[in-house]
Amino acid sequence: MKRIVLVLLLIPLFLSASAQKGSEWRYYETTLQYVPMVLDLGLGALGAQTSAPVLDRALALGSTAIVVSLSVNALLKNVVKEERPDGSAFNSFPSGHTTLAFAGAELLRRHYGNAWGALGYSMAIGVGIGRVIHNRHWWWDCVAGAGIGIGSAALGSLCVKPIKQLFGLGDSNLTMVPSVDPVSGALCANICWTF
């Protein structure tokens, strides 16, 4: 039962891409924000040396996504209510895209080292710059998002060991394969977990 609950807790991570507004997809940073996280989960399968097994990386990523969602979307955007530069809404602070990109970049650095981390951080910086250039955020929204993302990754990483102990996860094997839905074109994840 505990393992089923754990799987259900990871589902929001994979559904977060589909929650984006349709109009946001015209910006490159809406897709780029997820690339560091996808690399974090997938590089090990391609043979890159990693410091953590795929289950630990997935738990860190899921925990980080929950921290980001709660701190940015549920709390800060609703408390601060800063108007966007384009005047479209009052949820500018902090930049969720930038937060997610920097969280993924920090996880990538933690799991694969500084070289892969530098690639992730360069993508995350590109996301932040894109949000400002496309008039969706003020520069300080993106700077705050970067800090929150890095902190969220640190907190998410700290949650891995307690989650494994809580749910009795020892030796288990998690396999994830990305795919594209032929009907909607959405990026999907196929998961096989043996425990």
Image: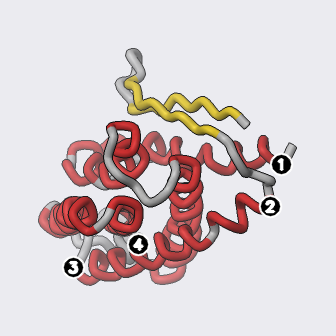
Query: In the image, what residue type sits under mark 2?
Result: Leu
Q: Which element type, helix, strand or loop, lies under badge 2?
A: helix
Considering the image in quadrants, where does the N terminus appear?
top right
| Residue 29 picture location, percent across and down | 23, 54
Query: In the image, what residue type sits under mark 3?
Result: Trp
Q: Which element type, helix, strand or loop, lies under badge 3?
A: helix
Foreground: disc 4 or disc 1: 1
Specify the quadrant of the image occupied by residue 188: top left
Q: Nearer the viewer, residue 76 or 114?
A: 114
Sequence-wise, the earlier of marks 4 and 1 is 1
Q: Which element type, helix, strand or loop, lies under badge 4?
A: helix
Q: Is residue 59 above or below residue 118?
A: above
Q: Which mark is residue 2?
A: 1
Foreground: disc 4 or disc 3: 4
User: Alpha-carbon distance for marks 1 and 3?
Assistant: 42 Å
| Residue 96 picture location, percent across and down | 39, 65
- Mark 3 lies on residue: 139
Residue at horizontal 40%, vertical 75%?
150
User: Alpha-carbon distance for marks 4 and 3?
Assistant: 15 Å
Sort mark 1 into few (<14), some (14-19) or many (20+) by Cα contacts within 10 Å.
few
Residue at horizontal 80%, vertical 61%?
166
- Mark 4 lies on residue: 149
Q: Which mark is residue 166?
A: 2
In the displayed structure, does residue 70 sit left or right of residue 180? right
Foreground: disc 1 or disc 3: 1
